[in-house]
Image: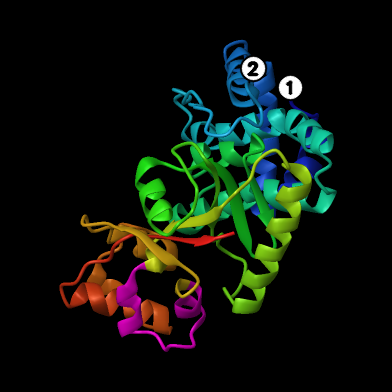
Amino acid sequence: MLPDADELAEVLLDLAVSHEDINELVRMGRRVMDDPELRPFLEASVEELVRDMGKIGGSVELPELDWPSGALQRCFPAYVFVAALPHTRAYHRELGVPADVSRHTLADLGRNMAVHRRRYGLPGVLAPHWLTHHFRGELYQLGRLQFERARCGERTVRALAAAGLDVAPGTPCLNLHIPDFLGPLSPAACDRSLALAREFFARHHPEEKYPAALCHSWLLDPQLKRYLLADSNIIRFQERFRVAREDTEPSDTEPVQFVFGDPDLPAENLPRRTSVERAVGDHLRAGGHWYVGHGWFPL
């Protein structure tokens, strides 16, 4: 199920796992394979993950390891993804996905572990459920942005149909995501990603026609226009989208999590080093709230 120690280290490097986490993962990997309780649990987890590979919106719930070792519990999903890697790569090869796209997509495991270390100072996988989309062929990294094969829900359909698009609930769409640790969200980088996505999905998923791209992010909160320059990358990113719907429930922890690394940081202690940090913190300190924006544009 898992490579031997030497090969495991190389696989973890390929998945962009931090050098400072690799030794501990290799050490604990021996325990995962040797323990008569852990190995069957790993096998069952991988089977759950790769079942219905490539199916849009497949319900995958990785079982959580109930184990007294905190480090092993935090890191166990990494072993599940490593063990599932041959299945994912075989699926990518079957579709003809270029090797660099496959590599960049699956490197989100390393990014996720980097976010965990930034927040807690310890190795671990922060959001295993999020990574199931990558390892099941639902999501791909294409340049600066990530694109997830999805289906339109009823609320999205209402917005798209009102704009004249021929859609129904279940119509394929692309959910757009903005990964961390990849530099500025420049218009040129976004243009390139969108061009790559149009070509990629037409070639590798020609059976799915995507009338629209959607994004659900605090970066689409229109209140940011009060604080950021009109030619800033975030505001120019917002201008690509039409409003799909508006949230009424605040999501203050979203920008705090993505800008500062920890959703639980108190507003009064947030730094003011950049224009985005000042926007997020000053707005909260003034008693305001942030909301997740929901936007779309036609493809």
Q: Crowding at label 2, few (<14), some or many (≥20) Cα neighbours within 10 Å? A: some
What residue is at 26 percent from the left and 79 percent from the top? 282
What residue is at 30 percent from the left and 63 percent from the top? 265
Tell me which amino acid carries mark 1: Met
Q: In which quarter of the image is the C terminus?
A: bottom right
The reply to whether residue 271 is visible in this rendering is no
Horizontal side, residue 196 vs residue 272: left or right: right
SS for callout 1: loop
Q: Is residue 280 above or below residue 229?
A: above
The image shows residue 138 at horizontal and vertical percentages of 62, 40
What residue is at 80 percent from the left and 44 percent from the top? 97
Q: Is residue 234 magenta?
A: yes
User: Could you say which is closer to the camera, residue 144 or residue 215?
Assistant: 215
Q: Earlier in the sequence, mark 1 or mark 2?
A: 1
Disc 1 to disc 2: CB gap under 8 Å: yes
SS for callout 2: helix
Tell me which amino acid carries mark 2: Glu
Q: Crowding at label 1, few (<14), some or many (≥20) Cα neighbours within 10 Å? A: some
Q: Is residue 205 magenta?
A: no
What residue is at 83 percent from the left and 37 percent from the top? 93
The image shows residue 210 at horizontal and vertical percentages of 60, 49
The image shows residue 57 at horizontal and vertical percentages of 52, 33
User: Could you say which is closer to the camera, residue 188 or residue 89?
Assistant: 188
Tag 2 residue: 43
Q: How many labels does the image show?
A: 2
Q: Give the range drawn in magenta.
A: 221-237
User: Could you say which is closer to the camera, residue 199 or residue 230?
Assistant: 199
In the picture, the disc for residue 1 is 1
